[in-house]
Image: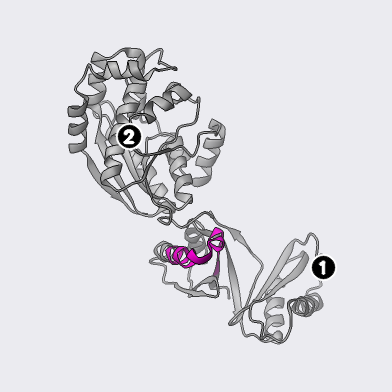
Amino acid sequence: MKNVLLVRMGEIFLKGDNRNFFIKALVRHIRRAVEGTGCTLELTQGRIFLREIEDMEEVVRRVTRVFGVHSVSPVVECDKDIEAICKTAVELMRPLEGTFKVSARRADKRFPMDSMQINEEVGYQVLEACAQLKVDVHKPRHVLSVEIREKAYLYVEKIPAVGGMPVGTNGKAMLLLSGGIDSPVAGYRIAKRGVQLNCIHFHSFPFTSEQAKQKVVDLAKLLSAYAGPIRMYVVPFTEIQQELYQKCPESQLTILMRRFMMRIADRVAGRAKCQALVTGESIGQVASQTMDGLCCTDKVCSRPVFRPLIGFDKTEIMDSAVEIGTYETSILPYEDCCTIFTPKHPLTKPRPELLEESEKLIDGEALIQRAIEGIEILNILP
């Protein structure tokens, strides 16, 4: 019975003397992911084993979403005895058809047979017992893996996971999360590199509805399945938008709104001890995302702005959204604050000095302070 799951680490093994720091973080995230399933975790010889699993499908679903996990395999465990290994191998392979090969790994060098001898003996016994199978060492349909450690572990299935680095091992960043397709994908990609996420969302009630706000909360919830708990800051943005609309040139509205968003996000990021901002911008996708526009928004920030999707086509971003499960929520027809007060002919080559002159027409500092004071903080759990 396969009630043991072998969990493989990926990039962590490249970390040298810092490896234990990353492994401890990964173990902590796996424990969180499987909480409530009743299974236990064991770390041994560079391998993580989950045991006493009642619902293998559910545990696999959860663990393969943990950043830092490279792949998993449901395994059969048996004694380190070649007869027991061969018997287990035959039972494991009996339901299968086609070609196969045996791939043994002897981590315990005290085992009396080397890897090649294990391959030959196990392969011979499987062939003898399973007439429907044939050996193909070059392009087999099935690979029977045998690992000799404190016990023997046999498996055929190798299920890919998300990979990356454990969340929290590479700092913390503030994601500007809208209700669109792009920003959740950007958050996913930056979290995959081990960055802990906070999120900030700009809500323009009554121009944007409570349904629109809930949509963003739902997106953050979907992200948290990968990135762990997320603190989300909901900023009231209506007053700033109305002031800009009434007093500033219409063609500048989009880029001016974006500059105020970045200013507020930058300040909130400082309070939350985030080292960078993250956006879902892709160069040239909309008017505010031209090279000139991006430079103008960066000028108002005191910390770096990461744009994981900067070179992606829209179709590539949509494909990623489908893959991570955020697409269907992102396309729900509820407007966000970026889609209201949109000028007919937005500026594509803004000049910082002209934007600064327009910003003098309003009391920007007072508007920012009131927006920050009105922030609603939500704690999003997986």
**Residue identifier under label 2:** 212
Between 15 and 125, the one lying in front of the other is: 15
Secondary structure at numbered mark 1: strand
- The answer to whether residue 155 shows anywhere in this view is yes
From the viewer's perspective, is residue 155 above or below residue 247? below
Residue 296 placed where, x, y %?
A: 39, 25
The N terminus - image quarter: bottom right
Query: Which quadrant would residue 98 be assigned to in this image?
Result: bottom right
Residue 255 placed where, x, y %?
A: 36, 22
> What residue appears at the point 68 percent right and 81 percent down from the top-left corner?
85
The C terminus - image quarter: bottom left
From the viewer's perspective, is residue 159 above or below residue 269? below
From the viewer's perspective, is residue 190 above or below residue 12? above
Residue 81 placed where, x, y %?
A: 67, 87
Q: Is residue 211 magenta?
A: no
Q: Amino acid at mark 1?
A: Lys
Q: Is residue 284 left or right of residue 124?
A: left
Crowding near the residue tagged with mark 1, few <14, some 14–19, many ≥20 C-alpha atoms within 10 Å = some
Image mark for residue 314: none
The colour scheme is one colour
- The answer to whether residue 374 shows anywhere in this view is no
> What residue appears at the point 36 percent right and 20 percent down from the top-left corner?
352
Tell me where the magenta segment starts and ends, as one range.
Answer: 6-27
Crowding near the residue tagged with mark 2, few <14, some 14–19, many ≥20 C-alpha atoms within 10 Å = many
> What residue appears at the point 50 percent right and 24 percent down from the top-left corner?
284
Image mark for residue 134: 1
